[in-house]
Image (tube, rainbow, N blue to C red):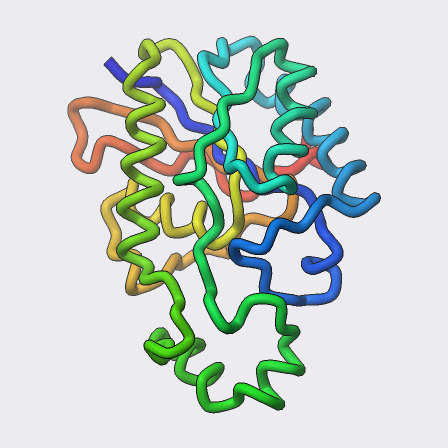
Amino acid sequence: MTAGRIVLVRHGQTEYNRAGRVQGTIDIELNATGREQARLCAEALPRFLAGRRVGALVSSDLSRAHATASELAERLGIEVALDPRIRERAFGGFEGLSRLELETYRAEEYALWRAGRPPAEMDVEPKLDVAERMTAAVTRHAASLAEEETLVVVGHGSALTILMTSLVGDDPERGWPLRGLDNCHWSELGHQVERAPAWQLRFHNIGAELW
């Protein structure tokens, strides 16, 4: 058996988000806006779920995701399970830098990264490695649930995008054709055993303003 639905939630805003800095694995807390976003998300998500049972709530162990998940946990009446495999993609030497700093001080490396070919010396985690760890983690948590249950996962923009790409059977290296998740927005994938791939995207980039 496996969960019939997975809901993927991106964490709330941080000061790095606001300033346009690369976060990656740096542990940045939510700012005031992010905390309010998490609160509103926690109010809206149960309405979106419309009474469907949440069998598990799993989060990245980075504080911005954990704090967002904690707001959801309080509203959903369920505990958060932390899983470091759901952390953001590691961006190595790019982490902590703004776009202006990247274009000024790392212009050549940044251009290669944007083209999908980050230099080895920048130590950026390969997309296929992210897809492997994210897919392994999320499908294992989903497999512990019944078909009528929903798995809620709280994570990070890049890693969740790569996960969605992998789950629907696309190549993570080719990129995601849709816009990525905004802060405290979510996507839903549904599971159908008779289809291949078994996971299909049903809702994407939904926020509290719609619910």
Quadrant that contains the C terminus? top right
33 in relation to 74, above or below: below
Lateral position of residue 156 relative to residue 29, left or right: left
Quarter holding residue 147: top left
- In the displayed structure, would residue 78 be above or below residue 43? above
The number of numbered badges drawn on the structure is 0
- Asked if 19 appears above or below 56 in the picture, the reply is below
Q: Residue furthest right?
A: 32
Q: Residue at x 33, y 33 (%)?
A: 137
Residue 51, horizontal then vertical, whole percent: 56, 9
The residue that appears at 16% across and 24% down in the rendered structure is 194
Residue 174: x and y, percent?
Answer: 30, 64
Q: Position of residue 113 (x, y in %)?
A: 42, 77
Quadrant assignment for the N terminus: top left
Task: Identify the residue shown where x is 19% and y is 22%.
Answer: 193
Q: Quadrant of residue 79?
A: top right
Q: Position of residue 115 (x, y in %)?
A: 38, 79
> Relative to 101, is 181 on the left or the right?
left
Left or right: residue 108 versus residue 36 is left
Question: What residue is rendered at 37% in x and 44% in y?
Answer: 164
63 vs 181, left or right, is right
Residue in front for this viewpoint, 184 or 98: 98
